[in-house]
Image (spheres, coloured by chain):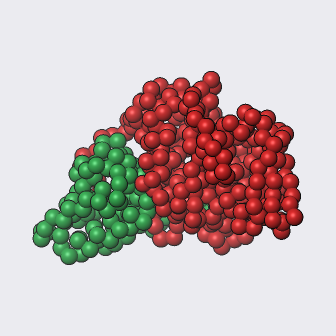
Amino acid sequence: MANNEIKINIYNEVGGSAAVSDTDGQKVFEKINKALKAGNSVLLDFVNIDMVISAFLNTAVGQLYKEDYSVEFLRSNVKTTNMKKDDWDILATVLKRAKEYYQNPEYRAQLDEALKEELDNG
Amino acid sequence: MSIKYKLPNKIENNYQSFSSLINLYQALMKLFVEDVYIDFSNTSYLEANLSALMGAIFDDTDVFVNINFENFQPRVQTILQKNDFLSNYGYTKIEDKYDTTIKYKKFKSNDTQPFYKYINEELLTKHDFPKMSESFRKDFAKSLLEIFVNADIHAHCDFVYTCGQYFPNKKDLYFTIVNTGTTIKQNVCKFFERDDISGMKSINWAVQRNTTTKQGISGGLGFATVRSFIQQNKGALQVISDDGYWSENIYGRINMKEFSKSFVGTVVNLKIKMDDTQDYKTIEEQFDEIFF
């Protein structure tokens, strides 16, 4: 059971209505990670954010799969609010990709091999 | 001492014109003179979105030389005054009554919020954009931002140059984003620890879904987002980096070529069809608030 719910206001973190840069994503990731490690849950508040792209999400939330958290743990302890519906698909795509990348080294090796072959034959 | 460099008759969004501008870039980089006169006397037609590439070239080389322009044909000079390109070289701005130009701008590579503001103010609220669906405008902006942030993440450059041009008769809008940083070829060669990968093959690899040269972090979705938007819109995409040229046309056909010389940076050029009435809302499954 988490101690407290820490709300992270994305607008304040990125300094505008577009959550796009990987540097801002890294800042957000560090805050989430710190809160989770301290036993808290996290609410990512996207209020006033009208643009989100993969470069931001890869670092902000994709990296959580690199840490030692189970999917169940992340599901119960990291939530989003006020995210525009048309940004949900990019979030889902980023998380799916991150899950494959960090949690399935076999898949990663196969993908790397396939991409390398493509480079040689392309 | 000074030298004159004559530009070609037409500067268009094609391989030949990119090749001419890369040759100009390489020629300027090798000069040891004080003044260079860029002679536009032959140039009767210029697709003004390419101001982004000219700006990057002249900016990158003006450390070594003073750039001057001469012998403009009136039509070419006017468009470059309308889109603010020539304001950077002491010319006055001319008002764009028909609103077909999209302002030439130079951004710091980490200026993501100002770039987003520019897209909204200079692009999405003008031209025929207000007629387009909101989802179209958003997906287009998303594509431009993915390209813009790549300059900071992968090219590690200081500046990014952008410009656009709308051709209302054809309903074509071109938008160009240029950086003068680490090229795609340099990144791909470093990633695979090889030195035998050509510029065009490197680009072809980099634009695939899930490929990324970032170490230890998932990614590879940026170009996929751009390509998917362009394909749905039946537009076209060109990427120029190092000595590689890569393009994808409305039928999804890919064309790759090499240049005889290299551009130390990357150009991403998008052609958007503005007579597109599709709704770009994703028809994928709906998600609830739990994603992990």
For residue B283, above or below residue A66: above
Residue A110 rendering spot, x and y as whole percentages: 53, 62
Quarter of the image with the N terminus of chain A is bottom left
Q: Which chain is assigned green?
A: A
For image coordinates 75% across by 67% down, the residue present is: B64
- Toward the bottom, the furthest residue is A38
- Toward the top, the furthest residue is B169
Quadrant of residue A25 within the rendered picture: bottom left
Front-most of B111 and A97? B111
**B256 sits to left or right of A77:** right
Q: Can residue B129 be seen from the camera position used here?
A: yes
For image coordinates 53% across by 56% down, the residue present is: B107
For image coordinates 44% across by 35% down, the residue present is: B125
For residue B169, above or below residue B256: above
Quadrant of residue A7 within the rendered picture: bottom left
For residue B178, above or below residue B229: below
For image coordinates 42% across by 40% down, the residue present is: B138
Front-most of B108 and B213? B108
For residue B40, above or below residue B195: above
Quadrant of residue A13 within the rendered picture: bottom left
Residue B175 rendering spot, x and y as whole percentages: 59, 42
**A30 sits to left or right of B188:** left
Residue A104 rendering spot, x and y as whole percentages: 42, 65
Residue A100 rendering spot, x and y as whole percentages: 42, 60
**B289 sits to left or right of A55:** left
- The number of callouts visible is 0
- Chain B pictured colour: red
Q: Can residue B254 be seen from the camera position used here?
A: no
Front-most of B58 and A30? B58
